[in-house]
């Protein structure tokens, strides 16, 4: 059962060290305690899987392993009735736990939820979830953002991430469901700008036609502003940001006042959805600025 670990995030504790390794340590960082025994079959699968999630958390939590055969007094004091049993300690007290083997998704959610309760834990958990989203691990990202929101449903960064993850999964209705969680007066917060802009574009994309048909309509009549804006929306929904920006810039160039400045409005929404660091958005903003100044 014992395995070498690359750092001190996972250690073994005894009755002599439990207060220091768990209770005292949890006042600085959340500590997850795995109660196991060598003869326990489920422990052999749960332990390594839990260790992997703790290590993936990058220092947001620690894990302490307690062999109940060798430390029966601790097991009795904490009323451990079956193993594996896992407890999470924060600020010297147990705050969460479970018994029995769990799927990897539940372990990730558990570790994320515990990490979010520590000092700076929510920021770390959000950073982890954003990396998952960027890497395309959408299910893991969704579970991580959900775990954060379970601890703090008004966390705007987590709300933003949850909306963007749902949209990446192609579930517009699920993304819209998070809108009711936005605190009053926070809908215009910059943290939510990209997510809300992406949602707006996704909703619009549901109303337009197929990309090929829209492109054909624009080629047949380059002055068809509505077709060009619809094409831009469709391209944005497909992830072709540069193509969408080009179409909107062309629409603005042809008639900037059409439909009460619709091309400019759609362009600003697209820029917001991409975020300030996106290279396509940065290039598009420069082109737009040069057109306005002409």
Image: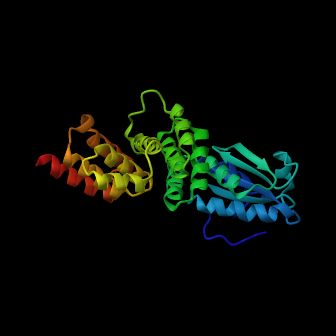
User: Does the image show residue 278?
Assistant: no
Which is more toward the observer, 258 or 24? 258
Say which quadrant the N terminus sits in: bottom right
Image x and y of residue 133, in percent: 52, 56
Task: Looking at this view, name the residue that lies furthest to the front.
Answer: 220
Left-right relation of 137 to 215? right
Residue occupying the point 80% across, 65% down: 44
User: Does the image show residue 257?
Assistant: yes
Left-right relation of 110 to 35? left
Image x and y of residue 143, in percent: 62, 49
Left-right relation of 168 to 27? left
Which is more toward the observer, 260 or 290? 260
Image x and y of residue 247, in percent: 29, 53
Image x and y of residue 282, in percent: 28, 55
In this picture, is 269 found above or below 131?
Answer: above
Task: Looking at this view, name the residue that lies furthest to the left.
Answer: 294
Left-right relation of 253 to 28? left
Residue occupying the point 89% across, 65% down: 39
What colouring method underlies this structural image?
rainbow
Task: Looking at this view, name the residue that lies furthest to the bottom.
Answer: 4
- Counting labels gives 0
Which is more toward the observer, 282 or 238? 238
Residue occupying the point 35% across, 47% down: 270
Which is more toward the observer, 244 or 8? 244
């Amino acid at each position: 059962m014992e395995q070498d670990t690359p750092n001190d995030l996972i250690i073994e504790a005894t009755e002599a060290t439990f207060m220091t390794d768990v209770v005292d340590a949890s006042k600085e960082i959340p500590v997850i305690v795995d109660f196991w025994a060598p003869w326990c079959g489920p422990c052999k699968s749960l332990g390594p899987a839990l260790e992997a999630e703790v290590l993936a958390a990058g220092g947001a939590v620690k894990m302490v392993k307690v062999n109940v055969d060798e430390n029966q007094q601790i097991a009795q004091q904490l009323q451990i009735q079956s193993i594996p049993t896992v407890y999470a300690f924060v600020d010297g007290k147990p705050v969460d736990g479970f018994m029995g083997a769990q799927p990897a998704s539940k372990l990730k959610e558990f570790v994320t939820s515990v990490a979010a309760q520590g000092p700076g834990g929510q920021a770390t958990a959000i950073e982890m979830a954003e990396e998952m989203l960027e890497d395309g691990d959408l299910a893991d990202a969704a579970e991580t953002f959900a775990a954060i929101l379970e601890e703090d449903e008004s966390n705007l960064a987590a709300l933003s991430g949850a909306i963007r993850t749902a949209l990446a999964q192609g579930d517009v209705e699920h993304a819209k469901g998070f809108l009711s969680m936005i605190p009053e007066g926070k809908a215009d917060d910059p943290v939510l700008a990209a997510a809300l802009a992406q949602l707006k574009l996704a909703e619009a994309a549901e109303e337009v036609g197929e990309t090929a048909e829209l492109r054909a309509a624009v080629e047949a009549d380059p002055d068809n502003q509505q077709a060009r804006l619809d094409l831009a929306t469709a391209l944005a929904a497909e992830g072709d940001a540069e193509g969408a920006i080009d179409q909107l810039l062309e629409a603005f160039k042809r008639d900037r006042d059409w439909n009460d400045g619709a091309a400019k409005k759609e362009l600003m929404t697209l820029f917001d959805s991409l975020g300030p660091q996106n290279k396509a958005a940065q290039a598009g903003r420069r082109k737009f600025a040069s057109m306005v100044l002409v």
